[in-house]
Image (cartoon, rainbow, N blue to C red):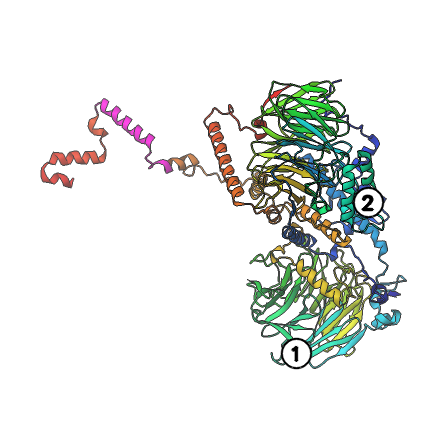
Amino acid sequence: MKIKALSRDVEKHTRETSGDIKKINRNLDPKYKPMERAREYTRAVQAAKLQKVFAKPFVAALEGHMDAVACSAASRGHLCPFVSGGVDGEVRVWDLASRKAVWSCKTAHSGWVKGVCVGSDGGSFFTAGQDKTVKQWKLGVGEIGGRKEKGGKKGKKGKKMYEDDEEGGSSSDEEEEEEEEEEGRYGIRGGPTTSSSADAPSLGYGNNSNMAPTPTPCNSWLFDNAFKSMDHHWKEEFFATASDESVEVWSEHRSNPIQSYKLWGNDSCNVVRYNPAERGLLAHCSSDRGIGLHDTRGGTGLKKTVLRMRSNCLEWNPMEPMNFVVGNEDHNCYSFDMRKLDQPTMIHKGHVGAVLSIGWSSTGREFVSGSYDRTVRIFQSRAGTSRDCYYTKRMQRVFCVNYTADARFVVSGSDDTNLRIWKAKSNDKIGQTKIREEKSMNYKNKLLKKFSHMPEIRNIVKQNNLPKFIKKQTSMKLVQKEGAKRKEGNVIKHSKKGSVEWSKEREKTVVRKMD
Amino acid sequence: MSFDVARGGYTKAKKNKSSDSTRHYNDGRNAIKESKASPATIEKYTKRNTSTKNLSGTVLKVRPGKNPSFKDKKASAYVSMVEKKFREGAVAAAEAEILDTTEGGFIEAEGEMERTYKVKMGEIKDSVDEQTAKQIFDLSLTDHPPYNVSYSQTGRHLLLTGRLGHVALMDALTLQLKTEFHLTHSGVNSIRSSTFLHNHQMFALAEKKAVYIYDHNGSEVHHLSDHVDPLALQYLPYHWLLASVGRAGWLKYTDTSTGEKVCEHRTKLGSCGVMRQNNYNAVLNLGHGNGCVTMWSPASSTPLVKMLCHRGRVTGLANDLGGNYMVTSGVDKKVKVWDLRTFRPVHEYFSYNDVQSLDISQTGVLAVGAGGGVTFWKDALMVKQKSPYLSHRIMRGGASCNEVRFRPYEDVVGIGHDKGFSSIVVPGVGESNFDSFEANIYEDKKQRQEKEVRSLLDKLKPEMIQLDPEQVGAVERDRKALVMEQREKAKEADANKPKKEKKKARGRNKISKKLARKHKNIMDESKLKLMEKRKADMREKGMGDEVMTREEKKRKKGLEEGGALARFF
């Protein structure tokens, strides 16, 4: 008879000294994990609650503009530089990491700055103003000097830099550039007087504001009409502007536009955007409520579609470059596939004011929209309702929104002269996470996804405290919608059977199509 | 030169056919085929509801990558993907068994003539290692018998309770006595049942008056006065619920984390002293005096299941860990095995003595404590065995078994009887590999505390207890549609039923005549019209008086009589 009994070595399962890590033993047999689904569900409910507990989206407000922030742009290739233009013609460059302005020019334009964008190489940025000019400014992309020391014997950094700037103010372009490189400083290079600025006290030259001359652009272009929008080509040295009567394509090396379009009548264009993938494709929104596409290589218009109301902004999805989203005057955002302009692929609802600006996440999965209703909403690219809604008491109408290049933050510029930095995921942890923490977060997210259909969890996730104004407007819109639905139902009820049918919302969006 | 918008402005990358096809058919089935682990092992890790085998044993034929139950392509693809993940997970888990180095015990007969049940405890003691041999011992405790036994969830601690008021808490590994005390306050014949709570720091005793909770030092920490005259106790560790049932037949649940009573159900079946939990779904199974077994959840005031199992009182009950089988014993001297998926008996055994206690080990060995002995039956749930795996007679002088319990994660069995307590070793009954996150045998203080907090966070709601635990978080089907479907099915079944032969009697019972009789006195519009018409016809024909109704005739006669008498007509 063979007899053997189960016998465990205690030392194999316990640690030798208290410094060792505790030994663990696994048995994956589901028999020993009863009611696993119920336990997972309980954890998912907790995760949903914790998500709401830690939802603190606001990171910082960037003060400095003297008037409303009209437009802003993040660099497409770099993390740090962020450019904003004000209604009063002021342009500022921000270092988002230190939350400070590193450069500013009060009189970049006279009147509104209508468009800013960072050039394709990231070394310069362009601003277009209502004063019929486009200006190019040099932008240094490197390490941020204020926070990183190089070399051993620098002494007081602030003072040193101040001296550098003074030198820079009198030296030539090249020398200045070299100086900057040596310092490893981030800021504006190029123009002889660019780096000293009135509003960069953090860098140590605040007292010198009266002495510093105004920065000058390294290039400027003049035109007959006031500009409404501009965009730079994603890869090449072209940029496009939209003005009162036409859309122009410019080369960085020519003083006159190389192409000018007056398509589909003389309506003024208010937005123009280059397609991220197709080098010659431009999309524009015009004040006749239209969205149009044209090809700069052939110089031809391709398609145009007219919506019920005017679109205020248009952005291409950076990862799915055949798709774009427009923000409309009728409070909705519309996703379009450029191949099928006869109806939107999705209507994104939620705002109770005109949508003024849209910014895509670099992942192409989400976009942020800023609205006249003083809120910022984040939509998933294929969702009809917003994932989250951000607001503060002090934030006024949002004119511009952008995602940072790492898709972790959202920057909004509003009427109250401030730029605000928000987390893209409201419960995101800023700072380094431990591996265990990260694992736990991943586990929680997975559980949330698994049980996202459950009413208990859905209600917690969906729950969002909104200002009274927004709530009221939303409920009012709901009443209006119900009324319209009832009316339509009545029409159908009192018509001959089959002659009138329920109209589809997406089909109603597009009024007219032109080719 | 013009830009091709219609095609999206980009050319699609040509699909690599070979890679595409491999991706299409690699849905986890290949992984099962290629795996080094045996299919049986993989099956163990496959969830019950995701298994393609249904109860009747037929295998559903599903084409890889396509799920027939979905019209929606996306949903179908998603479900296929999830199923694939499950299959791959099962394979990975099965392959990871290689890492489990602790081997389970066994008794193997070497010759054809050898029988394992003839092995005596002395032989086992001689052939196992010293540490295990220590687990074979008898405690002669004759002052407070009979004894009840309960082990903590990790199997590390042992609680002995003598019916007459003796309580002893032991470390089952080191065999040290942790605490010992005698109850005096609730009189003689006091302790009916005992159970550990979430860890060995607290335990509950069912005493005559009420349920009391003691801590590991033996001090009384709670007195649950709601639980009056309890006879059996069960603790549901994942729900933190303590349940008792007693002489009045009330099943009561108390939440041990908040101390609140969750619910109480009236069983309406009288005194009940047999209660065990189904580990798979935390449903409580009660054995009653009339031979019924009822299954309870806090969510329902009526039993989820009520099944007649025995003729006469149910004396013992046990569930297997997987939740598929239940074993019951009754005063009819039968031990029956039930399939809990179909609620049908699988087979039954006969016992010469009245069965006192039943238990099923983690590996599925059935222990039957009857009279002065305990017999162990291996693989006896699915297949009917002819002879036991092992049999053991309690103590030399003879003792009557009161309660038999397997110690989790060890090859040890504790037997409480009327002369004390016996601990024996039965090779092959304990799970060799424990999971540190479920039940850590060697946990230290810190780990125990952390586990306590974690399990509190993961505490399940009492309402989640139901027969199918996989239903939690699942999508409920549309009730209306379900009812309609059931009706359709019933209709179909009715249509197929052979029709009852009609009793045919001529004459009075003819259906047309029946109807005519029914409609004879009904005065409806059409009938009135008809009468009017008939009258008019008659008048035309000049048969004025004959057409008159009885009332009209009367009135006419009255008028003819004239004067005051007219009103009497």
Three-letter amino acid code of the residue under disc 1: Gly
Image-quadrant location for residue B544: top left
Magenta part of the chain: B518-542
- Residue beneath label 1, please? B165
Q: At which x and y percent is residue B124? A: 85, 70
A349 or A143: nearer the viewer: A143
- Residue beneath label 2, please? B32
Label 2 marks a residue whose chain is: B
For image coordinates 70% across by 29% down, the residue present is: A135
B250 or B154: nearer the viewer: B154
Q: At which x and y percent is residue B129? A: 88, 69
Query: In terms of secondary structure, where does tag 2 sit?
Result: helix
Outermost left residue: B563
Three-letter amino acid code of the residue under disc 2: Ile
Considering only order in the chain, which callout, 1 or 2, is on the residue closer to the N terminus? 2
Going by the image, does A498 lie left or right of B528? Answer: right
A318 or B118: nearer the viewer: A318
Image height of B427 relative to A220, above or below = below
Label 1 marks a residue whose chain is: B
Image-quadrant location for residue A354: top right
Q: CA distance from mark 2 to mark 1?
A: 56 Å
* Image quarter (top left, top right, bottom left or bottom right) of the C terminus of chain A: top right
* Image quarter (top left, top right, bottom left or bottom right) of the N terminus of chain A: bottom right
